[in-house]
Each structure stands twice: as C-alpha cells, then as structure tokens.
Amino acid sequence: MVNLLGATALAVTDLLVAGAKTASGTSSSGAAALVLLHEENRLNVTELGRRVGLTQSAAARMVDGLEQRGLVTRRPTGSRWVSVHLTAAGRRVARQLLDSRNTEIAALVARLSLADQRTLATILEKLLTGIHHGVGNSDRICRLCDRGSCLRAGASCPVGQSRRRQAAQVGAHHDARAGEAVG
C-alpha cells in the first residue's frame, strides 16, 4: 500500500505540475505564486517566496519573470516593502491554472464510483490533517488549491481545520503556562 500511495502521489503531482506549467507558461513556483495571489492579492515578495518554498532572492527573480510577462505588478506599500499584485492577465492565467487543475483531478476521480469517491474524500481529509500536523505550513500545502472548492456546499478545508485546532491548542497551552507564572 505504501508503494501504491507513493506512486499515485508522484503521478498526480506530475500531472498537476505539467498542467500548471502549460496553463501558466511559467515554472511550478510561478504558477503557485499566481494561484496564491489570486486568493490573496498584495503579498510582499518575501512572504510570497515563503509560501511557495523559495528564498527571498529566488522569489524576487520569480516575480521579475512574472512581471516581465505582464502577470504581476509591484507597488510600494508606504514602508520599505513592495507588494505584488496580479494584473488582469495574471488573474486570467490564475483562473486557467485552477480550471486546468480541477479538470485533471476530475478526470482521475471520474473513474471511481460515487461510493469510492466519498471514501477517497474521507481518507484524503485524514491524510491532509496528518500532513499538516507534520509539516505545519498550510500555505505551502495548499499553494495550488482552489480554496473556494473547500468551502462549497458547507464543506470545510481539513488543512484549515487542522491549523485552527493547532492554534487553539497553542493558545490554551500558552494560557495555562501564563496562569502558572502568575499563580
């Protein structure tokens, strides 16, 4: 089973990365940056790089390339930071990326019965929760996600739920420790 999961994960990753590169005409990091900016426009270069797993200098080069292609612009924020914004073309490409991703995944899942699809969804939610507990970086895990699809029909993103549970546990632990110091 471990080998099957590993092979499936790599094959799905290869499909998604190839689709993202084709849809965006850029690197997988550039594609992820466009999707992130589609969800949260106005990130600074350093934060954008952190979320896609790049150093600040690599992120700056990535943004340079996206800017040269007319997909993003940089705007001063009033401080020493510069925020990155999608252009209209960048928004179109980000939407194409998400549509391409959704089409690829839907084609894979369509081969399963509805009962198998429901079972797979339950298993994937558990796996994502476990991955988040290990990695702890929801932005990195969800860097190519269509975040709106996690919230459709009253659903809830398992990674977001895991993040909120961890934050509540840290807050409760901090409150308990603060009470020990005071009491």
Image (spheres, helix red, strand yellow):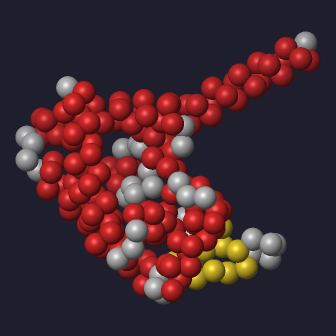
Q: Quadrant of residue 122?
A: top left
Residue 12 at least partly seen: yes
* Place of residue 127 in the rendered image (x, y in percent of width and height, measured from the top left): 35, 32
Residue 52 lies left or right of residue 12; in this view the side is right
* Place of residue 107 in the rendered image (x, y in percent of width and height, measured from the top left): 14, 56
Give the residue displayed 46% in from the left and 85% down from the top: 69
Query: Quarter of the image containing the N terminus?
Result: top left
Give the residue displayed 24% in from the left and 50% down from the top: 12
Between residues 161 and 59, which one lies in front from this camera angle? 59
Query: Quarter of the image containing the C terminus?
Result: top right
Q: Does 48 sit above or below residue 3? A: below
Between residues 164 and 128, which one lies in front from this camera angle? 128
How many marks overall? 0
Q: Does 31 sit above or below residue 183? A: below
Give the residue displayed 45% in from the left and 40% down from the top: 159
Q: Does 175 sit above or below residue 138? A: above
Residue 151 lies left or right of residue 1; in this view the side is right
Q: Does 180 sit above or below residue 88? A: above
Q: Quadrant of residue 20?
A: bottom left
Residue 17 lies left or right of residue 181; in this view the side is left
Give the residue displayed 42% in from the left and 29% down from the top: 130
* Place of residue 90 in the rendered image (x, y in percent of width and height, measured from the top left): 45, 79
Residue 96 at least partly seen: no
Residue 10 lies left or right of residue 65; in this view the side is left
